[in-house]
Image: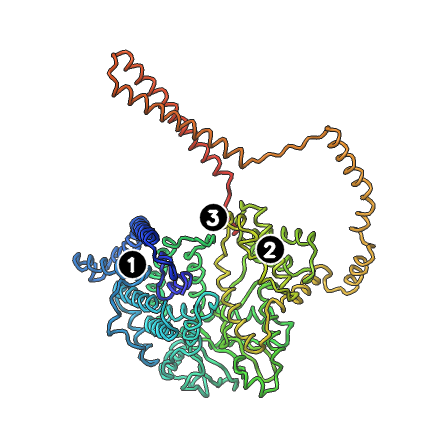
Amino acid sequence: MALKHVIVLACACATASAYVAPSRRGARATPLRVATLEKEEKVAVAVEAAVDDLVVAPAIEAAVAELVEEECEVEEPEPECLDEAKLEETRGLLRRLMRSSVSGAGGKSATAADTAPADGDALEAGWEARGKSSSIRRNLEVWRALARCAYKVLKARKGTSEDKTAAATYARDKLLTLGPTFVKLGQVLSTRTDVLPAEYIDVLKSLQDDVPAFSGSKAAEIVAAELGVKDLSEVFSDFSKEPIAAASLGQVHLGTLKKNGMKVAVKVQRAGLKELFATDLKNLRKLCELLDSVDPKSDGADRSYIEVFDESEKLLYEEIDYLNEAKNADRFREDFKNDPKVRVPEMVYEYSTPRVLTMEFIESFKLTDIERVEAEGLDRKDLAKRVADTFLYQIVDTAYFHCDPHPGNLAVDTDGNLVYYDFGMMDELSPNVKQGFKEFCFALFEGGPMISDIQLGVKAKQLVDAVETAGVLAKGADRLSSEQLARYFIRAFKDKQLGVDRSDGPGIKSSLGTELQALTEAQVFRFPSTFTFIFRAIASIDGIGKGLDEDYDLGGFAQPFVERLIEKLKYGGDNSKKALAIFGKATGLNAEDVNTALTQPRKIEYLENTMRAIEQGQLKIRVRSLENEMALTRLGTQSKATTNLLLASLALNVAAAAKLSRIPTIGLFAAAAAVGASGLSALLSLAAFDKKAAKYKSKDFNT
C-alpha cells in the first residue's frame, strides 16, 4: 500500500507512514554499493529523527496538552484530573497512542481485546454507555483503537491480499465498536476507490447499508417519546418491529398513519449521538492537526486536513437534525420538479422531530440489484445515463448536490424512475467554486473532441482562469506553466474522446518536466474541502453506473450534457437563435467574422510597417527578465555582505594573532568594525529585500 493509502486510512484508523526507506530490490551488493547504502540509511535515520524532534513530537505534545486541558480546566473536573499521578499517566499513554497512530505501532501486537463487535442491541448499548462515560476515558479508548488499527494495517501493507482483507475487517469492526462517528468515516473511505486498495474497499462497503440494527422495541420507545405520545398506536395503526434499513446514525421502520392510512417510512435516530460526537470529533481534529504537521506535501498540493475536517463536522451535525434533512429533501425535489423520472419522498412534518423523520414510503429497489432490474424489463444503459445526467445536473447546473448517493440512497421503482433517499448530507458549492467549475466544464467540453492548436490555446487560458476562480489554483501561480499544463490535459482528454492511444507517447513528466516541477514545488494547487464530497459522490455514482453498463463513462455522458447547458446559456432555449448562429458561423455572415474581414487590411498594413521598421533598424526589441534582474540584485547584495564579513573576520584574525604595535592593531580593529558594519548592513538590506519581494508573491486562493 502506497504512502497516500496509509495517510487516507489514518483519517479512520490513524495510519500514516510519512517516512519510508526506499526499496532497493535487485541491486547488486558490491562493497562500494554496500557502503553507499549504509551511508544513505544512516542519513535517512538521522533525517527521520530530526523530523520527529522538530515536527512530530511538538505536535503530539501540543495535542495531548490541549485535550487534557479541555477536559480538566472546568468547574467540575473529572476524577482523573484531581490526581496528578494519574493525570501524568494519562498524558504519557496519550502520547504513546498518538505516536503509534501517526507513525505505526512500535511492534507490540494487539491484545486479546481485539474482538469482533456484537449484535445491534449490544452495539447500541455500548455506544450509549460510551456517550455517557468520562471524556478522558473515551479519549484513551479512541487512541488505543486507532493505534491497534495502525499496527494491523501497516503489518499487512506488504502482505498478501488475504492479509489486507483481514486488516480491513479488523479496522471495520473497530470502527463499528467505536461508534457512529467512526462508522461514518468508514463509509466515506469505502467510496475512495482512487486511493484505497480493493481489499479495503470491499470490506468497508459493508458499512454503507449493513450496520447492525437495534431492536424494534427500542425504536418504538424513541418515536413515542419524540412525538409526545404514550403509545405508538395513537399515531400509527401499524408500525413494523423489524427495520427495513439500518445505517450509522439511525434506522428505518415501516408504518401506517392512523389519521389517513398513508403508508410511511419512519427514520429513527440512534441514542446519544451528540454526546459521542462532542468527544470523537475533538480527537479527530487532533489527528488532522497531526497529519497536517507530518504531511510533507511532496505531490505539490497545498492540502489541509483541518479544512476537510471542518466541512465534514458541519455536515455531520446537520445530518443528525432530521428537520433539516426534511428541508433539504424539499429543496432537492424542487430542483428536479421538471424531471418526472426523478422521485423524492414527501416529508410528513406533523410527525417529525429533530430525531424522528416521517416520510412517504416509495416502493423501490437498489440499482445494484441487476437481476431485479432485468426482471422488471428496465433498460440498464438508459438507467446508467440518467444516473449520470442527474448527478451532472446537481454539480454543474444547480450546485446543490447529494453527498452520499450510494446504492442504499439511490434506488429505482418498477416504472424506471430514479428514487433518492437520505438528504442529511447535502452540500452546496460556493459562488466562486460554482462559477469556476462551470467554466472548467465549458473549457474542457465546448466544441467537441476536435480542436485546433489555436482553439487549444484559447481553451487552456479559459481553463486556468476557471481553476483560479474556483480556488484550486493560487492567484500568484506561474501562468505560462499553468497554461502549458492545461494544454496537455485538454489535448489528452480530447484524444481519449477520439479513441487515440497515447500510452506509447511521452508522458507528462517528459513533456512538461520543468513546468510541472516548478508548479509542484510552489504548491499552488489546493482542492476546496467541498471537493472531497464531490469526489466521494463521483465514486459512488461511478460504481452504480458501471454495474448497470460496462461501457459507462461519466466523461462521455458529460459531453452532450455540457453542450446542452452551453446552448441553453447562449440561446436561452430558442432554436431559431441557435439555427441562425450555426448558419452565420458556416457562411461567415456574423458580426465577428464581418468585423475581422473589414479590419484585416489595416492589420496587414500595421504588420508591414512594423517589419519595415525592424529591417531599417528603426525598431529595437528589448526583452527584460524581471525574475532574473531581481535574482541578480539579491545575489549582488548577498555577495557584498559575504565579502565584507570575510574581510572583517580576516582583519580581526590578523589584529589578534600578529604581533604589531598598538596603533596598527587599533587600526585593524577599526577597519574590521567598519567592514563588519557594512556587511551587517548588507544583510539587513537583504532581509528587507526579501520581505518586500514576498509582498508581491501571492499564493492566495479564491474562497
**Amino acid at the residue labelled 3:** Glu
Q: Mark 2 points at which residue?
A: 488
Using the image as rendered, state which of residue 279 and residue 433 is in the foreground.
433
**Amino acid at the residue labelled 2:** Tyr
Q: How is the image coloured?
A: rainbow
The location of residue 382, given as percent across then percent down, is 63, 77
Can residue 500 be spotted in the picture?
yes
Precedes in sequence: disc 1 or disc 2: 1
Q: Residue sitting at 50 percent across and 82 percent down? A: 264
Question: Helix or strand or loop: what does disc 1 sit on?
Answer: helix
Q: Would you call the spot at circle 3 few (<14 residues within 10 Å), some (14-19), or many (20 or more)?
A: few
Precedes in sequence: disc 1 or disc 3: 1
Q: Mark 3 points at which residue?
A: 521
What's the mark number on residue 77? none
What's the mark number on residue 99? 1
**Is 386 displayed left or right of 68 in the figure?**
right
